Amino acid sequence: MDLDNLLPDVGEYGTYQKRLLWFVLLPCVLPCGFHAYNQLFMAASPQHWCYVPELKHLDIKEAKQLSIPKSNNGKLSQCLMYDRNYTAIASFPNESVPLGKAVPCKYGWTFDHSEYKETIVTEWNLVCNKDFYPTGALVLLAIGGLIGNYIFGYIQDGLGRKPAFFIYLFIETVFGIGTAFMNSFWSWVLFRFGVGFTVPAILATPYVLSIELVGPEYRTTVTILINIAYSIALTLLACIVYLVRDWRLLALYTSVPFAFFFFYLRDMPESPRWLLARGSYAKAEKILNKMAKVNNKPIPPDWFSRKKGECDKIIHDVEDKKHYGVTDLFRTPNLRKKTLIITFIWFTNTSVYVGLSYYAPLLGGNEFLNFFLAGAVELPTYLILWPAMEHWGRRCALSSSMIFGGLSCVLTIFNQENEFGTWLGLVLYCCGKMGISCSYVVLPLFASELYPTVVRGLGMSTSAVVGMLGPIFIPLLNYMGGELPLLVMGVLLLLGGIATLFLPETHHLHLPQTIEDAENFGNSKSKTSTSTKWNSERNDRQQILSSVPSWRYKYKLRQSRDYFREGRKKIASNRGLLRNVGLRRGKKPRT
């Protein structure tokens, strides 16, 4: 027996889970949302042009006309100036002075501070021959996340969900605050690497903990709420940047408040599901008793002792091997196939989600508004996604959202360079963002239900680590500009949507606990053994049917109806088959 069998007695989604979710787990989503994208605004590059000290007394527009040549696109250059005698121009403004040739800026740059008071670009002149530095910093941030995600998986499965979160919260807070006091670009990059070490790994604990504390029917609810909190974090970040507009203050405002999260040390529990899988019965019993008390679910004093015997088989399966590694994810063929597919889809989702978020400032117009809309456009998708996940399941929701988002991104290559094309491009971008937002919600839930408890954190972290390879290259792709980034991201989404169809459905099914459970789950060769191992007969039938195409199920249903028409005698002869597959119309199978 696993926690899914214990939760009905203590409450699957009662007051205990709701309080924990709303007052602890949802706020713990904010650190990841803030630190994943605040660097975009710290390293924002405003409009700039060559500084000419002799012309500083002139109007900006007039000074530009005298000193700045035009680029090939007809706009004033941001990196070149005329090599002229500006002293003579300033002394004798009415005299004609030869333009001279265009040369790189000699005296630095003048920046437009109408949108940003100060960024690292304006403070350290990271433009022209240094304009790649902010992009390189994003790459290093992603490399930090790649390393941090890998280590986080071992910490989360080895020490527990709770210690892993607070270790990473400490690292993120210290390096986030320290960022504000850096006086050179390379020291700033070092501290941002430290912040990147925790992103997005720190999001895994509130997500996994919320999933593991509720019953199967409520996983969709908590998943949607976690992602709503993340989208709200993005919109809040846009508001903070709009009000602050200074990179040092932004670093402080998005880091200092999270130091108060250490007060959650007492309130955040360890995952009882993880404790049961590890054989820590005493700690699990304490949490479950508190859960039952808060949820007003009276249980007898010996309740857990009686239930404990039912858990012995699972513990027997894992007691000989307490420590798991990445190789265990590839040890058996069915789990290996699911791991490879999940990892590819994770790579696709992470690459495109981060890529589209990074692309928002490149859309033109107000950068704050663009980023705000990029986060806000995610919220309406949950109104569609919530019933879709409940009605059609995880696999259909994930595949359809990725294909929809992929088509939207690919269609941007047909835009024309006019006002209509600009608006059409914005609409297609928003559609692509909605599609990837939907799939980004479904994927972690889907993956957490496919990986077994003993390697769930490790499996998700491994997939996320490979996924973090995408954000390493995405800044380089966006640096190239144009529609190429959207085209590449669209193709990735389409491939990911097709790959999803090769995974089994998990909706309303018990989470696999052991490697053997995960291997049997969705494996057509193990239907009988799986149904005898798990207790809920309804879930067993759904599990069997999820591993075969829907057309085969409908064919069997039509076939069984024909049997009914042929007479009760023939039905009786096939009753055993009908009871196991669960196809008797209008009746529940007998036990």
Image (tube, rainbow, N blue to C red):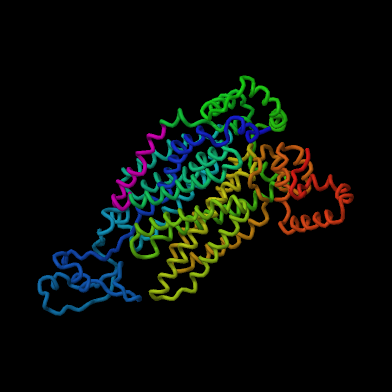
The x and y percentages for residue 180 are 32, 44
In the displayed structure, 380 sits above or below 488; it is: above
In the displayed structure, 541 sits above or below 267; it is: below
Comparing 261 with 46, the one in front is: 261
User: What stretch of residues is rendered in magenta?
Assistant: 240-262
User: Is residue 188 highlighted in magenta?
Assistant: no
In the displayed structure, 591 sits above or below 186; it is: above
The x and y percentages for residue 535 are 72, 36
Q: Residue 53 occupies which quadrant of the picture?
A: bottom left
In the displayed structure, 319 sits above or below 401; it is: above
- At x 69% / y 43%, what residue is drawn? 539
- At x 72% / y 50%, what residue is drawn? 545
Comparing 93 with 253, the one in front is: 253
Residue 380 horizontal side relative to residue 93, left or right: right
Q: What secondary structure is the stretch in magenta mostly built from? A: helix
- At x 46% / y 48%, what residue is drawn? 228
The x and y percentages for residue 238 are 36, 52
Quadrant containing the N terminus is top right
Residue 10 horizontal side relative to residue 332, left or right: left
Question: What is the count of numbered marks?
Answer: 0
Q: Is residue 95 visible?
A: yes
